[in-house]
Amino acid sequence: MLKKYAVLLGITIAITLLVIAAACYPGGSQADIKSIGYSWRNNYISNLFGDKAVNGAHNGGRFWAVAGMFFLSAAFALFFLEFSKKIPLKGASKIIKWVGIIGMVFTFLIATPLHDIMVMIASTMFLLGIFYITVFVLKSRLHVFKFLCVGCMLVFYATLFMYGFGTYRVYLPIMQKVTFTVITILIVGLEYFTKREDFQHIKAGRSGSNEAASNL
């Protein structure tokens, strides 16, 4: 039972810890350095990882935030591991598994002073893993997940664009949380509402095509 719901449990613990971290955050944001407390509209999630808050005060939420990132990264890594088992093509399955797992190591390191470079590496690896998953979902009959996968990638790309180019940066904290929400919904959905059988026809179809070609 614990193994079955490990991904959901890990995400739940992570969100709980991040909320606690936000409650302990002393203040300061990109909109107002002297503001009190954590603003879900104006603060980045990364503001929770520093020893000091934006306003210069000691950040009592750092421990909780780092712990939250650990559980979140572990839960997402477990998702990639388990989902890769549903993919019938060994090459793609290995890519999803290892890109996902290794990418989550870099995701956890976002909570360190290496934040900026880790964001780019972790984002690249995560998008690669989701891209491979999306390819198989698009070939399945999982119509709702087709929209979710494509939507997730579009939202993620939009957020990275805003982060990299500074465009509409005032809205970036909101987009960051929207992206996190969409990713979480997608991962929980793929973990608990898809099964191996949803993708088995892809292997059969490929094998059938190869057999037909060899008979010509």
Image (cartoon, rainbow, N blue to C red):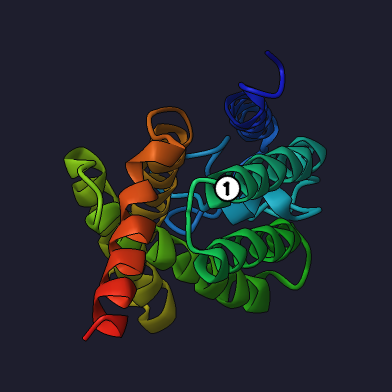
Residue 31 point in image, percent of width and height: 42, 55
Which residue is at the far top? 1
Residue 34 lies, in percent from the top left, at 56, 49
In the rendered view, does 153 fall on the left or right side of 147?
A: right
Which residue appears farthest toward the bottom when viewing the image? 216
Name the residue at 68% across, 69% down. Answer: 115
Residue at x 61%, y 21% (from the top left corner): 5
Tell me if 151 is positioned left or right of 23 in this view. Answer: left
Number of marks present in the image shown? 1
Is 13 in front, or is 88? 88
Callout 1: helix, strand or loop? Answer: loop
Q: Position of residue 43 (x, y in %)?
A: 50, 49
Q: Residue furthest front?
A: 215
Amino acid at pointer 1 = Lys
Q: Which residue is mark 1?
A: 85
Work out whether 35 lies above or below 112. Answer: above
Is residue 169 visible to the viewer in this orientation of the structure? no
Q: Is residue 203 above or below residue 60?
A: below
Query: From what the image shows, is residue 13 above or below residue 139?
Result: above
Residue at figure coordinates x 32%, y 67% from the top left:
206
Judging depth in this view, the residue of 106 and 160 nearest the camera is: 106
Say which quadrant the C terminus sits in. bottom left
- Residue 125 appears in the figure: yes
Q: Nearer the viewer, residue 162 or 68?
A: 68
Task: Name the quadrant of the N terminus.
Answer: top right
Q: Is residue 176 shown left or right of residue 111?
A: left
Find residue 22 and report its image quarter. Answer: top right
Residue drawn at x 76%, y 45% as measured from the top left: 66
Give how far across and how far down residue 37 sits, in percent.
58, 35
Q: Residues within 10 Å of mark 1 (few under 14, many from 20)?
A: some
Question: In this view of the protein, which residue sits in the foreground, 56 or 42?
Answer: 42
